[in-house]
Image (cartoon, rainbow, N blue to C red):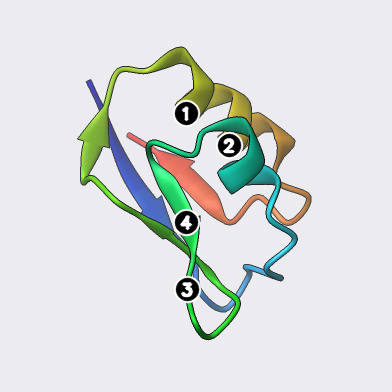
Amino acid sequence: MAKITIDQDACIGCGVCENLCPDVFKLGEDGKASALVAESDLPCVQDAADSCPTSAIKLE
């Protein structure tokens, strides 16, 4: 199971993560991504991290 962290300073709010993995990522009122869960083993989480244009999503 991967622990999910998002660098809010790096996030540009493009929405790629939410589009790829809506069960885990959501754009907030501030336009920045947040994780709906702290950990996940869904394959789309890795896809979202790999697709983030600013590498704001970190998985441990």
Classify 33 as above or below 4. below
- Image location (x, y in percent) of residue 17: 60, 44
In the foreground, 1 or 32: 32
User: Which residue is under mark 1?
Assistant: 45
Dot 1 or dot 4: first in sequence order is 4
Q: Which mark is residue 26?
A: 4
- Image location (x, y in percent) of residue 1: 22, 20
Q: Quadrant of the C terminus?
A: top left
Could you say whether the residue bearing mark 4 is in a helix, strand or loop? strand
Point out the frontmost of discs 2 and 3. 3
Dot 3 or dot 1: first in sequence order is 3
Q: CA distance from mark 1 to mark 2?
A: 6 Å
Amino acid on which disc 2 is placed = Ala
Q: CA distance from mark 1 to mark 4?
A: 12 Å
Point out the frontmost of discs 3 and 1. 3
User: Which residue is under mark 3?
Assistant: 28
Amino acid on which disc 3 is placed = Gly
Q: Crowding at label 3, few (<14), some or many (≥20) Cα neighbours within 10 Å?
A: few
**Badge 2 vs badge 3, beta-carbon distance below 8 Å:** no
User: Which residue is under mark 2?
Assistant: 49
Residue at 73% in and 56% down:
54
**Badge 1 vs badge 2, beta-carbon distance below 8 Å:** yes
Classify 13 as above or below 56. below
- Horizontal side of 11 relative to 46 (left or right) equals right
Q: CA distance from mark 4 to mark 2?
A: 14 Å
Could you say whether the residue bearing mark 2 is in a helix, strand or loop? helix
**Badge 3 vs badge 4, beta-carbon distance below 8 Å:** yes
